[in-house]
Image (cartoon, rainbow, N blue to C red):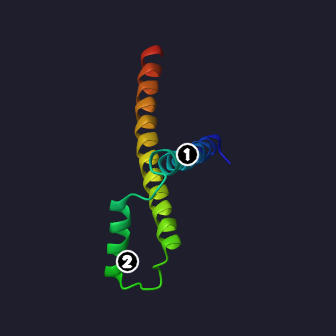
């Protein structure tokens, strides 16, 4: 494998791991520190979606709390991805600018 492709794979793997673990940590913080109980608005939103999709199998409160945790996890991954990618691009541009300025 060429060194350039290897660096690209290493960068993508590092970004993926950072996004994964930071999203999981953020979801843990939200679920256990901020909202130990499922918020009423989330309960209403999940019930609304389930009522309008026609799925009558998922009505158990345990299933609703699991769906709530999954929604929190997915939202945390999205937020972590946005933040990490924006910061990565900023650092990449600053590093390239610094390298260009230093080279004769």
On screen, residue 7 versus residue 23, left or right, reads right
What residue lies at 61% left-to-right and 41% top-to-bottom? 7
Residue 6 in the image: above or below residue 51:
above
Image coordinates of residue 47 in percent, x first then y, are 36, 73
Residue 78 in the image: above or below residue 62:
above
Question: Distance between the Cα atoms at labels 2 and 1?
Answer: 28 Å
Mark 1, residues whose alpha carbon is within 10 Å: few (<14), some, or many (≥20)? some
Residue that numbered label 1 is attached to: 25
Image coordinates of residue 55 in percent, x first then y, are 41, 84
| N-terminal-most mark, 2 or 1 | 1
Residue that numbered label 2 is attached to: 50
On screen, residue 15 versus residue 1, left or right, reads left
Image coordinates of residue 39 in percent, x first then y, are 39, 57
| Residue nearer the viewer, 101 or 36 | 36
The answer to whether the residues at label 2 and label 1 have Cβ atoms under 8 Å apart is: no
Label 1 sits on a secondary structure element that is helix
What residue lies at 64% left-to-right and 44% top-to-bottom? 6
Residue 61 in the image: above or below residue 55:
above
Q: Kindly report which numbered mark, 2 or 1, lies closer to the viewer in this rendering.
A: 2
């Amino acid at each position: 494998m060429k060194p350039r492709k290897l660096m690209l794979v290493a960068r993508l793997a590092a970004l993926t791991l950072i996004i994964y673990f930071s999203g999981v940590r953020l979801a843990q913080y939200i679920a256990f520190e901020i909202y130990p109980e499922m918020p009423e608005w989330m309960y209403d939103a999940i019930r609304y979606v389930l009522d309008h999709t026609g799925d009558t199998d998922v009505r158990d409160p345990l299933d609703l709390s699991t769906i709530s945790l999954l929604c929190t996890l997915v939202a945390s991954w999205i937020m972590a991805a946005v933040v990490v990618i924006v910061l990565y691009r900023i650092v990449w541009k600053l590093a390239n600018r610094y390298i260009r300025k230093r080279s004769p």
